[in-house]
Image (cartoon, rainbow, N blue to C red):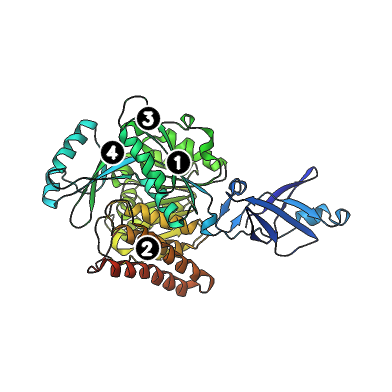
């Protein structure tokens, strides 16, 4: 448990107190549930929670500066203060979520529906995401347009996560920001406007070099799987946090970085370090199996320096990590997916390895598994829904998981919310969900999180999985389509 550190006169003391949060018009106040040794705590929390953001918080437990008063100064000894053994506890609602910042490339996704046979003429290895130069992108778009109409949706992994968190909260309940760089062009202006319309504050620098805004062609086959090629253009010109205004980190409780930031390790390191200095959590996803291969050293450097708290990977990325680091236990096969995922998570959680708090692996049609450094575990089956495409599904899974985690939910509930969000995403075209999908997600999330107050252990796990499945059943009924296993990556 964390305790509050404060100064009483000239001496510092460690002390904490059970408290409840009460809303009072435009502000909130922590009110002691009880008193001990006639101590009283009063701490105002402004409606945007900026005062709380400087505190370390994981769920309902936080380290918070407080003002101390007592009814009789002479009767409160230094010994009584230093030995106070109570815990400040804050129970946030989704409407009280602090600021979440996303770091990544603002990419305009351009979707094309193609056949598997045609895709084989473009790449021998379907799936994944690789960078291409502007000339190659123009050529690929030209031939893709002969296969289907092209649909433009603003995306980028971290931006998708921010859109997910903002919309799951609903009605401005989450303060989400997205940091990146666009070109001085129509695509950049379009991206900025559409991101703001999703409830995300665009902290987007504008390049003056003439480079175009980033774009990605997403080639989607009939089974819903996607192969992506990106032209990052102006987004690559953001290389250091020194280019940003100092205010980007103000109030930050969580910085979520997409894995592609590892191609610019200085930027990733500086942003993560700045967030950690402010007491914020840092999460990252591994993006693609190619990135795990190409950026192994950059990833290990950040992990071993303790700059990452939560790490997300899909099964393919976890297996690749296991292979490139030779993590498979003696006697096991490196092509055993379950063994590889377990080995990768053990490494990421170990003090000698990744040093993260939580390692999360999505398993496609089999759901997901999460493990904590403290031994906590969570898992959830995937929801059964009709797959349209998987673009952005992994990002929305991450958004669902983080939305629950930021409310202090156990890993079991976080997994269930993540799977419910992923199930909604695979039923939509591109990384954009309709309002009705978020309505269902908010309802499902409330049901999932409610289970933790009434049940525990296997019963809670079953209840959480059932609540996650309920949203998928509702979505399938609305769609009126045959139900199939929905995979998210």
Q: Observer-nearest residue: 276 or 464?
A: 464
Label 2 sits on residue: 420
Observer able to see residue 429: yes
Give percent across and percent down for residue 15: 72, 54
Q: Observer-nearest residue: 156 or 354?
A: 156
**Mark sitting on residue 215:** 4
Image vertical order of residue 398 relative to residue 294, above or below: below
Q: Are marks 2 and 4 in contact (CB under 8 Å)?
A: no
Label 1 sits on residue: 302
Disc 3 element: helix
Mark pair 4, 3: CA separation: 15 Å
Return the residue found at the far front: 25
Q: Would residue 364 appear left or right of 438 to someone viewing this image?
A: left
Ranked by sequence position, the earlier of labels 2 and 4 is 4
Disc 2 element: helix
**Are there few (<14), some (14-19), or many (20+) residues within 10 Å of tag 3?**
many
Observer able to see residue 297: no
Label 3 sits on residue: 237
Ranked by sequence position, the earlier of labels 4 and 3 is 4
């Amino acid at each position: 448990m964390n305790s509050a550190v404060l100064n009483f006169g000239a001496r510092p003391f460690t002390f904490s107190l059970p408290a409840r949060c009460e809303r009072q018009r435009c502000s909130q106040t922590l009110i002691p549930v009880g008193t001990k040794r006639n101590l009283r705590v009063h701490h105002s929390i402004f409606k945007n929670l900026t005062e709380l953001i400087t505190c370390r918080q994981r769920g309902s437990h936080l380290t918070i500066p407080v003002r101390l008063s007592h009814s009789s100064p002479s009767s409160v000894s230094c010994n009584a203060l230093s030995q106070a053994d109570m815990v400040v506890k804050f129970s946030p609602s989704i409407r009280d979520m602090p600021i979440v910042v996303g770091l990544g490339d603002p990419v305009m996704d351009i979707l094309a529906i193609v056949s598997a046979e045609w895709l084989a003429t473009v790449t021998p290895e379907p799936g994944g995401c690789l960078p291409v130069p502007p000339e190659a992108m123009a050529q690929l778009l030209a031939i893709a347009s002969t296969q289907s109409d092209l649909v433009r949706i603003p995306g980028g992994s971290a931006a998708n996560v921010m859109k997910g968190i903002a919309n799951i909260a609903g009605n401005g309940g989450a303060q989400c920001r997205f940091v990146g760089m666009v070109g001085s062009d129509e695509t950049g202006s379009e991206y900025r406007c559409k991101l703001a319309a999703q409830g995300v504050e665009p902290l987007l620098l504008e390049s003056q070099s003439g480079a175009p805004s980033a774009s990605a062609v997403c080639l989607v086959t009939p089974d819903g799987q996607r192969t992506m090629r990106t032209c990052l253009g102006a987004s690559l010109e953001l290389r250091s946090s020194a280019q940003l205004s100092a205010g980007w980190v103000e109030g930050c409780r969580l910085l979520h970085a997409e894995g592609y930031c590892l191609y610019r390790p200085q930027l990733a390191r500086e942003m993560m370090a700045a967030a950690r200095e402010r007491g914020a959590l840092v999460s990252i996803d591994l993006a693609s199996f190619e990135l795990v291969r190409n950026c192994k050293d950059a990833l290990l450097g950040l992990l071993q320096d303790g700059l990452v708290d939560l790490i997300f990977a899909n099964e393919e990325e976890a297996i690749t990590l296991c292979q490139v680091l030779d993590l498979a236990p003696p006697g096991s096969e490196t092509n055993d997916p379950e063994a590889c995922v377990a080995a990768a998570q053990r490494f990421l959680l170990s003090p000698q390895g990744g040093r993260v708090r939580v390692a999360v692996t999505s398993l496609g049609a089999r759901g997901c598994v999460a493990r904590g450094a403290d031994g906590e575990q969570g898992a959830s089956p995937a929801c059964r829904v009709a797959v349209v495409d998987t673009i952005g599904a992994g990002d929305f899974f991450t958004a669902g998981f983080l939305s629950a985690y930021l409310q202090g939910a156990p890993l079991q509930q976080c997994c269930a919310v993540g799977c419910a969000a992923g199930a909604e995403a695979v039923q939509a075209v591109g990384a954009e969900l309709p309002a009705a999908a978020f309505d269902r997600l908010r309802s499902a999330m409330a049901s999932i999180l409610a289970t933790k107050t009434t049940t525990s252990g296997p019963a809670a796990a079953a209840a959480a999985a059932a609540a996650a499945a309920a949203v998928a059943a509702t979505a399938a009924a609305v769609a009126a389509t045959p139900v199939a296993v929905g995979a998210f990556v």
